[in-house]
Amino acid sequence: MSVLNGKKILLGVSGGIAAYKTASLVRLFIKAGAHVQVIMTPASKDFVTPLTLSTLSKNPVHSSFFNQDDEDAVWNNHVDLALWADLMLIAPATSNTLSKMTTGNSDNLLVATYLSAKCPVYFAPAMDLDMYKHPSVLSSFTALKSFGNIMIPAESGELASGLSGEGRMAEPENIIAFLEADLESKLPLKGKKILITAGPTYEAIDPVRFIGNHSSGKMGFDLANEAANLGAQVILVAGPTHYKAKNGLVKVINVVSAQDMYDACHEYFNDVDVAIAAAAVADYRPKVVALQKIKKAADEFSIELEKTKDILASLGAIKKNQFLIGFALETENEIENAKLKIQKKNLDLIVLNSLQDEGAGFKKETNKVTFIDQDFKIEPMELKSKESVAVDILNKVVLHFAKS
Ligand code: CTP
């Protein structure tokens, strides 16, 4: 999945022949799952029509401070547009637009919006080869880079003038690749490996029966997707569940029993930076697993159970630098029990679920959690979707690495 998926992109088109290529650019953004709004300078409309770009972007195109055709002229709020965007790309960026950007000459909607933008701004210059090397243009590049804007260098090739050299706007595919590589390199968990457990475990009684629980696995899968979206390399050890990882970069290891989950976790743990135990692991399993289906006979029947290994505690016992997060599902003395689990399992953070909280727990779309850290700092959170809880948990991970 592209890192551009779900991103809100503001494309500023200025007036150069390369503007015709923005049709492909918008199409590639949409294909990558991005939301696109386009701002055109008046001059750019000579090279590509607003109708083309609005059709491809599935949004109206903005080009003036107010819509002249409307009976009650509606102001195009450049501040709102700028704040809407996750990133702004000016492509093609002509020497005229670049120079206005450096001096703050906001006589058109594109430059006014640029000046209001708080998001990262990229620009892809396009001009003839001599213009591209002119000191005045080079000083625009230097100034914009000093503002923190990111230049997508022009490419070499045949130019509209008939001359050949550097100055062609980067090809749309290359602009997309540039943005993806740049955004990926800046993801907060880039380079980190995270091990996550999810779902229930099934403990066999005989070949057809098992002891299980109602965990759906949603919390663990949401964590895995979110961690991958933040750039982490994710290994998700999942008990039986119908969930699939939305982010194709998540490596899913399917297991059945607590022992399988234990083995899989220990295979990867030494190599990871973070481990999050979101699975509802069975605490007991049948001491003996019948090889054949147990036939109905006596009126009463009991199964002798033995303890499973505590996976999280076993990871806590061998952890080196790993940031270790556990969950605690409690029905009474929640905070005290959770604190004991932090100590017993050598955790850095525990995510406490109380079944007494409405909307929390198994088979729910929502969760209400309280964070407790190693120093017993308690942070109760609001009731939220499990996706939002996953975001909160991973923010703690990001914060941990930001501090260390
Ligand atoms: N856990 C685990 N392996 C087990 C049992 C639990 O890794 N065999 C992990 C869970 O994934 C969770 C944490 O331990 O992150 C706490 O689970 P919980 O069921 O709340 O607690 P238990 O340790 O099983 O204790 P109890 O059931 O007595 O509350």
Image: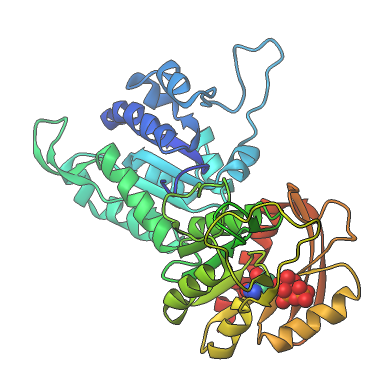
Ligand 1: give its quadrant: bottom right
Q: Residue at x 63, y 83 (%)?
A: 313
- Which of the 4 image quarters holds residue 403? bottom right
Which residue shows up at 56% across the image and 54% down it?
A: 240
Q: Where is residue 359 in the image (x, y as percent from the top left)?
A: 83, 51
Side (left or right) of 242 relative to 155: right
Residue 134 appears at what percent x and percent y? Answer: 22, 51
Residue 47: % across, % down: 32, 22
Q: In this view, does 349 lie to the left or right of 264?
A: right
Residue 383 higher or lower than 51, as above or below: below
From the viewer's side, name the closer residue of 156 and 196: 196
Quarter-wise, where is residue 301 in the image?
Answer: bottom right
From the viewer's perspective, is 256 left or right of 218? left
**Res. 327 visible in picture:** no
- 17 lies above or below 49: below
Query: Can you say which quadrant of the picture contains the C terminus?
Result: bottom right
Instruction: Tell me residue 124's x, y (percent).
Output: 33, 45
Indicate the colouring scheme: rainbow
Q: Which residue is drawn at 43% across and 23% down?
A: 56
Q: How many marks?
A: 0
